[in-house]
Image: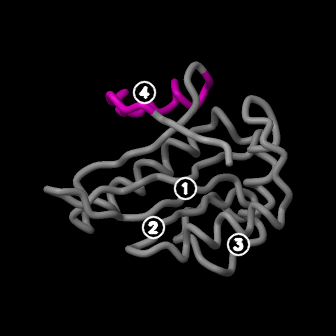
Amino acid sequence: MEPERIDPFGEGCLDGCAELFAAVFSAEPWDEHWTQDAARERLEEILGSPGSSVGLVCFSRGEVAGLVLGCVMRRAGERLFYLHEMCVAAGWQGEGIGGRLLTRLESRLREMGVGSIFLLTGKGIPAEGFYLENGYREVPVVAMAKDL
């Protein structure tokens, strides 16, 4: 069995990543009811976003165990990374994969001259605690939405 490896996110791993994404975000605490086709479309949209898409995929024991994906965007005084999606397979959570993905991502972004990372996550769920434990902080932002 191959050891764990972290590779750049690319077209070749899209199906495995879509399967992982759909499974993770269709389960608790998200309950978003993703299909694999919808997840693939979401990931393709991020990959095709203007600016530089940056993503990493963790493979463990031959399967996709986690992913992180987002885009570098201009902000007034710096370039920032908008972390669109990150997930780790249920069976791999708590094994350090998420932390290793973030560490590798942050190193890559520093090399690109990116000054900060911005993300949105749910309040009071395990993901919030995960990001806080990895050095992220809450910022004074109000998330707003409108149904059409």
Residue on which disc 3 sits: 14
Q: Residue 94 carries which label?
A: none
Nearer to me, 10 or 34? 34
Residue on which disc 1 sits: 68
Could you give the CA–CA distance between mark 4 and mark 1, rounded to whole angstroms?
17 Å
Q: Is mark 4 on a helix, strand or loop?
A: helix
Could you give the CA–CA distance between mark 1 and mark 2, rounded to whole angstroms?
8 Å
Instruction: Tell me which amino acid carries mark 4.
Output: Leu
Residue 15 in percent (x, y) is at: 77, 71
Query: Which comes sooner in the sequence, label 2 or label 3?
Result: 3
Q: In this view, does 133 lie to the left or right of 128?
A: left
**Which residue is situated farthest in the bottom direction here?**
12
Could you give the CA–CA distance between mark 4 and mark 3, rounded to whole angstroms?
29 Å
Residue on which disc 2 sits: 54
Query: Which comes sooner in the sequence, label 2 or label 4?
Result: 2
Instruction: Tell me which amino acid carries mark 1.
Output: Val
Q: Which mark is residue 132?
A: 4
Q: Give the range drawn in magenta.
A: 125-142
Q: Is mark 2 on a helix, strand or loop?
A: strand
Q: In this view, does 31 lie to the left or right of 121?
A: right
